[in-house]
Structure formats: C-alpha cells, structure tokens
Amino acid sequence: MTSHTASNDRPILILGGSGKTGRRVADRLRALGRPLRPGSRSADPAFDWEDAATWPAALDGVSAVYISYYPDLAAPGAPEAVAAFVDAALAHGVRRLVLLSGRGEHEAQRAEDVLRASGADWTIVRCGWFMQNFSESVFLDPVRAGELALPIGDVPEPFVDADDIADVAVAALTDDRHIGQLYELTGPRLLTFADAVDAIARATGRDIAWTRIAMDDFTAGAAAQGVPAELVGFLQYLFTEVLDGRNEHVADGVRRALGRAPRDFADYARDAAASGVWG
C-alpha cells in the first residue's frame, strides 16, 4: 500500500538534505519522480534549526518530512528543538514524519519519545555508526594519510551503511505500512574500529595504521585540523559514553523494513576504494 496519490505531487521536505543520509534520500526520491524540498540554510526557502522563523516557509505545502537534526540528536537541546519542529509540522498539516535517530543516545531517545507522543504518522530510523564516516566525514583525512588515531578501545560496533539508511527512510516516507514502526538499523556483523581500518587497508591495498590515543590528544588534534568545536564535543561524547559496549549487538531493522540483508562493511570498503576516495 503506498501513500495516498493526492500527496504524491506535494514535495517531501528533507532536513539535512546535503548530509550523508539526506543527500541519498533526495537522490532516491528524484529517481522515483517524487518532488522534494531540501531543508538547509542555503536552500530556498531556507531552513535553519536555530531559527524557528524559517520553519513555516519550509513546511508550507509539503506532504512529509525526513527529520535529520544537526549536529546530532545527542546534542544538548536537540529533543526540545525536535519537539518544537514537530508541533510546527502538525500545525501546517504535515503528519508524515520520519526521524533519523541514534542508538544508545539518551537525548535521541527523548526525541523519539516526543515523536511517538505527538499524534503524527511517525517512523523512527535508529542507527549507529555510519560506514561512511570513514569515506565522507571526520575519519576521511586520517585514513587518506595512512593512520587513524582515536580514543577508542576494542569495542565492537555494527557499522551501518548510509545507503541502507536512505533505502529505509525512502520506504518510510512513501509507503504507509511503515507508519508507527521503529527500525533499528545495523550492518550484519560486529567490527572493532581496528577491524574496520584493516578492511579498508585490504580494499585499498595500502598500509593504514590504527592507533589508540588519549582523549586529550584526540580533541587537541581535531581542533588543530579545524574540526568544528560542536563536532569535536559530540565525538567526545560518543567515544566516552556511547562506545561502552551498549550497542554490541546487531539488529534486524533493514530486513524488517526492506526484506533483505543489510550491506556488509567489506562490500562498502570495496566500493569506496573503487571510487578513489581514499587516494
């Protein structure tokens, strides 16, 4: 059963439309011929999480929203901002809301609770570490340089592919059978960060070292490389609190939502290496 045809000619608002998942969601909706509206500061109309005055124009006439909060739902004040946005969406007659959430993050769970209690037609897409953090984000430059040094021990993580996240999000935005579902998305197996770096080294045929460092050294190095302070703070939170073993299990969300297995890290590493992103 697909969404009502009446809404198919109204755009879907994609918050974080240029981000790792938002960009992929947009690409898939375009391929389906669905109209969309990017939600970002540079879009027209502009959308800014920190300026609620920008929200009404972004919400005007849309059929559904993909909610991706910047910098992350774990950030202080994120649940309150999401609550205010959900209220604004419902006030504009937008009922279909799909939230990108984080595994094992207290603030993210609060944002999920807001959505569940809102009366909206909601779907929650709850994810852990993205595989693409190694090829499109904060870990890209260190991997290119031949050494990833992080303040993390041998805690395994079921890294999830951003393409799987986007596939589930698009299904949720366009098919009513996903209303009221919480999909916890992971890859098919657990890997430590050392395992992940080893898989990238094999895929690229390069020597890439994995080093465990002190938190102070990491934050100082990230700041020196120009990583924004809010991102450094968020990574610090993830490394110290969320990577404590609480997510050491795989989940079945990709299979439940899409009827297929999630993508494996080795396949991601092979394709990313073939793209030349790691040099």
Image: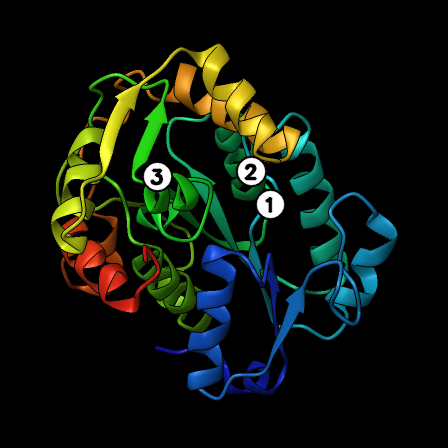
* For residue 130, above or below residue 237: below
Quick check: marks 1 and 2 in contact, CB under 8 Å? yes
Question: In the depicted view, which residue is nearer to us: 217 or 134?
Answer: 217
Q: Is residue 46 visible?
A: yes
At x 48%, y 89%, the residue is: 33
Which numbered disc covers residue 222?
A: none
Disc 2 residue type (three-letter): Asp
Q: Residues within 10 Å of mark 2 (few under 14, many from 20)?
A: some
At x 38%, y 21%, the residue is: 242
Q: Position of residue 195 (x, y in %)?
A: 15, 34
Q: Position of residue 20 (x, y in %)?
A: 47, 56
Q: Secondary structure at mark 2?
A: loop
Disc 1 residue type (three-letter): Tyr
Quick check: marks 3 and 2 in contact, CB under 8 Å? no
Q: Position of residue 142 (x, y in %)?
A: 38, 38
Which mark is nearer the camera, 1 or 3? 3
Residue, disc 3: 129
Give the spatial CA distance, label 1 vs label 2: 5 Å
At x 58%, y 81%, the residue is: 7
Q: Residues within 10 Å of mark 3 (few under 14, many from 20)?
A: many
Q: In the visual, does 184 lie left or right of 235?
A: left
Disc 3 residue type (three-letter): Trp
Residue 2: image quadrant is bottom left
Residue, disc 2: 72
Tell me the quarter of the image containing the N terminus: bottom left
Give the spatial CA distance, label 1 vs label 3: 15 Å
Residue, disc 1: 69
Question: In the depicted view, which residue is nearer to us: 22 or 278?
Answer: 278
Question: In the depicted view, which residue is nearer to us: 78 or 95?
Answer: 78
Residue 257: image quadrant is bottom left
Q: Position of residue 169 (x, y in %)?
A: 41, 61
Give the spatial CA distance, label 3 vs label 2: 12 Å
